[in-house]
Image: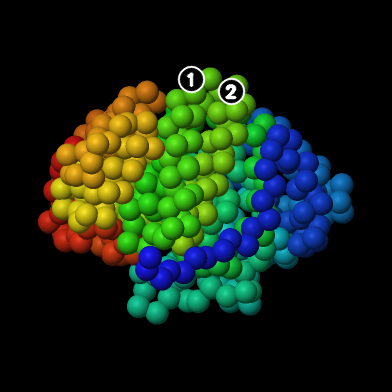
């Protein structure tokens, strides 16, 4: 066994039905005035925004609400939220919602903690710069309350943000943005629509498949990834078909948590590296849907070009999906593609880029965006990748 490092998450995880009620007690430990970050409608409409505010106010906290988050949150949204946090002198940031709300909360915590009288932008911390601004312990504490089972952001040291002007969607990485507390309330998760369940659930699947085959994988991340894959194969179709299936919701939430723990140390690879530029060029295309269009062809590419270890891992993915594998050969490894395509059919995500509205004349720009903003995931891919490969993979996914 080769030597490895493992990043031990520092998040206090509170998991189960009705756990939103703990937000006030936990927030009180971290600050006196909270910026509560949400999307524009769902958390308020479903009553969870009110419950969160009441819980915190009961414990004596002041609460300021910032409810402008949209899917694929932008630099402008983050900076606007940070300005509100700074103006109101908030000292703890709470993200309530899906990955976009939680990522926005994390990024707001970074900007708010590092401003010190000067106006700065979250983009200054992006690793697209030769010398990005460093994220330090000045970052405000974050509490995450997830409403989806997909991004793993509630237990990870990653956040994403999109620069619309530059057509780049990048990851912000730092142990200082790990949520201090993460609340996974299955009551909130039960309100996900079938389409959102499918999109976020497949995001979980790609997180753990990519982390599993990544060059940075290790025995600990492999354990989480394999277990999470089994859970997604077994429970995502159930959660998609019946949103009231509590057992399916619980196990998808657990798979999502395993995924966040895995990618903290290992790394997402080519599917995410290619899907982020799609989000930058086509913000109306949901992240999980873009992944669904790209993943099968990328799996075939990695199997075709992969070494013995990579082929073996794809065989193990097939086994996690309940497929009998007779030997660790490339032919047998391709069964992993079959089982993923079957899953996509079950959750009605068997889509193509062309069907999603992606135009061929954008492939060049998306390829450049991938190499500029997603260098880490490209380098972590188990198979070396050149520019021509990415052009071909976009074309093959059309």
Q: Is residue 28 above or below residue 243?
A: below
- Would you say 158 lies left or right of 383 here? right
Q: Nearer the viewer, residue 369 or 147?
A: 147
Residue at the far front: name it: 326
Structure colour scheme: rainbow
Quadrant location, the N terminus: bottom left
How dense is the environment of label 2, judged by Cα within 10 Å: few (below 14), some, or many (20 and up)? some
Q: CA distance from mark 1 to mark 2?
A: 9 Å
Q: Nearer the viewer, residue 315 or 113?
A: 315
The part of the image, by quadrant, that contains residue 34 is: bottom right
Residue 185 drawn at (x, y percent): 67, 38
> Is the residue under label 2 in contact with that under label 1 (CB below 8 Å)?
yes
Residue 100 drawn at (x, y percent): 51, 47
Q: Nearer the viewer, residue 247 or 88?
A: 247
Residue at image location 47% in from the left, 76% down from the top: 133
Q: Is residue 372 visible?
A: yes
Quadrant location, the C terminus: top left
Q: Secondary structure at mark 2?
A: loop
Residue at image location 87% in from the left, 54% down from the top: 60
In the rendered image, which residue does mark 2 sit on?
Answer: 245
In the rendered image, which residue does mark 1 sit on?
Answer: 241
The part of the image, by quadrant, that contains residue 49 is: top right
Residue at image location 43% in from the left, 69% down from the top: 4
């Amino acid at each position: 066994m080769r030597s490895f490092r493992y990043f031990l998450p520092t998040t206090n995880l509170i998991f189960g039905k009705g756990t939103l009620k703990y937000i006030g007690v936990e927030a009180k430990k971290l600050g006196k005035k909270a910026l509560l970050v949400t999307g524009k409608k769902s958390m308020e409409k479903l009553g969870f925004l009110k419950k969160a505010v009441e819980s915190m106010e009961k414990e004596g906290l002041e609460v300021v609400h910032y409810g402008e988050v949209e899917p694929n949150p932008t630099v402008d949204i983050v900076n606007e939220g940070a300005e509100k946090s700074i103006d109101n002198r908030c000292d703890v940031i709470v993200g309530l919602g899906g990955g976009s709300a939680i990522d926005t909360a994390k990024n707001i915590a970074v900007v708010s903690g590092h401003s010190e009288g000067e106006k700065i932008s979250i983009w200054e911390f992006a690793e697209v710069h030769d010398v990005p601004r460093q994220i330090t312990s000045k970052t405000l504490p974050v509490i995450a309350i997830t409403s989806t089972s997909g991004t793993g952001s509630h237990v990870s040291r990653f956040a994403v943000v999109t620069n619309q002007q530059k057509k780049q969607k990048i990851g912000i990485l730092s142990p200082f943005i790990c949520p201090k507390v993460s609340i996974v309330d299955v009551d909130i998760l039960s309100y996900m629509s079938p389409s959102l369940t499918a999109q976020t659930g497949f995001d979980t699947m790609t997180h753990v498949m990519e982390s599993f085959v990544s060059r940075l994988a290790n025995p600990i991340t492999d354990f989480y990834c394999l277990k999470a894959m089994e859970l997604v194969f077994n429970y995502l179709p159930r959660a998609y078909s019946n949103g009231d299936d509590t057992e399916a919701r619980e196990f998808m939430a657990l798979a999502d948590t395993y995924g966040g723990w895995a990618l903290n140390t290992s790394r997402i690879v080519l599917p995410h590296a290619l899907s982020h530029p799609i989000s930058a060029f086509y913000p109306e295309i949901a992240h999980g849907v873009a992944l669904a269009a790209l993943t099968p062809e990328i799996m075939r590419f990695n199997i075709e070009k992969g070494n013995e270890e990579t082929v073996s891992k794809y065989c193990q993915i097939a086994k996690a999906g309940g497929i009998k594998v007779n030997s660790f050969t490339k032919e047998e490894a391709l069964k992993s593609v079959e089982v993923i395509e079957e899953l996509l059919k079950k959750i009605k995500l068997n889509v193509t880029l062309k069907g999603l509205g992606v135009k061929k004349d954008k492939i060049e720009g998306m390829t450049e965006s991938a190499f500029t903003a997603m260098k880490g995931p490209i380098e972590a891919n188990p198979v070396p990748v050149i520019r021509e490969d990415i052009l071909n993979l976009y074309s093959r996914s059309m």
